[in-house]
């Protein structure tokens, strides 16, 4: 089973989508991208009798096509960063100011219902973005705790 988040990243990243489609095309494969999380990714054989050694290639086609796709997906990582509901909007606003060095190498998916930010991309790029977002979350938590403490102290002094 392929992770939908990784497939979603590939579908939305033009250079990555083009690269995997080219890699699969080289092994006589066409990919049909899933439209929803419950859809399957379909690999279709494009071998024809015009291709030299087509019968021999047909014997190993499925294994080679799947292996190429899995090898491509191995370098992509998925990170789910959970955020407290109280600071979720603040974190999202701060993320908008985030500068990503290689934007084609990573994608952010916001899961509003779960209060989660999903970072999907090439491991090296995604790791840097995860650290940056984690720093934003920590700062937002610290600010929230400070304001909460300040409110408590104000209420105590008010009594």
Image (spheres, grey):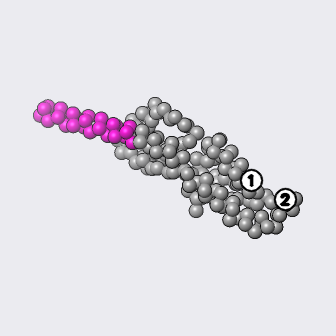
Residue 26, how many percent across, how many down?
74, 53
- Label 1 crowd (10 A; few <14 / some 14-19 / many >=20): few
Outermost right residue: 50
Q: Decide whether residue 154 is among the magenta residues.
A: yes
Residue 134, how many percent across, how many down?
39, 42
Q: Determine the image quadrant of residue 51.
A: bottom right
In the shown orientation, is residue 69 left or right of residue 129? right
In the shown orientation, is residue 34 left or right of residue 78? right
Q: Main secondary structure of the magenta part?
A: helix
User: Which of 27/138 is in front?
Assistant: 27
Q: Which mark is residue 51?
A: 2
Picture residue at 51% right of the left edge, 51% below the top? 77
Picture residue at 46% right of the left edge, 41% below the top? 128
Picture residue at 38% right of the left edge, 45% below the top? 83
Residue numbers of the magenta segment: 134-159
Question: Mark 1 or 2 closer to N-term?
Answer: 1
Q: Is residue 72 visible?
A: yes
Quarter of the picture containing the N terminus is bottom right
Q: Which mark is residue 62?
A: none
Q: Decide whether residue 53 is among the magenta residues.
A: no
Residue 87, how many percent across, how many down?
36, 39
Identify residue for label 1.
Answer: 26
In the shown orientation, is residue 44 left or right of residue 98? right
Q: Is residue 108 visible?
A: no
Q: Secondary structure at mark 1?
A: helix
User: Which of 95/70 is in front?
Assistant: 70
Q: Are marks 1 and 2 in contact (CB under 8 Å)?
A: no
Residue 45, how many percent across, how many down?
76, 60
Gap in angstroms between the C-alphas marked 1 and 2: 12 Å
- Label 2 crowd (10 A; few <14 / some 14-19 / many >=20): few
User: Which of 71/142 is in front?
Assistant: 71
């Amino acid at each position: 089973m392929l992770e939908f988040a990784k497939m979603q990243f590939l579908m939305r990243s033009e250079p990555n989508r083009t690269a995997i489609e080219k890699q699969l095309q080289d092994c006589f494969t066409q990919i049909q991208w899933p439209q929803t999380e419950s859809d399957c990714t379909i690999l279709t054989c494009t071998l024809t009798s015009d291709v030299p050694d087509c019968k021999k290639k047909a014997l190993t086609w499925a294994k080679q096509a799947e292996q190429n796709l899995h090898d491509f997906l191995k370098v992509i990582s998925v990170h789910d960063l959970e955020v407290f509901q109280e600071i979720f909007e603040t974190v999202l606003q701060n993320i908008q100011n985030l500068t990503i060095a290689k934007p084609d190498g990573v994608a952010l998916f916001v899961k509003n219902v779960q209060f989660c930010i999903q970072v999907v991309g090439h491991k090296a790029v995604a790791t840097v973005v995860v650290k940056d977002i984690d720093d934003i979350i920590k700062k937002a938590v610290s600010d929230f705790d400070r304001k909460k403490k300040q409110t408590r102290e104000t209420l105590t002094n008010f009594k």
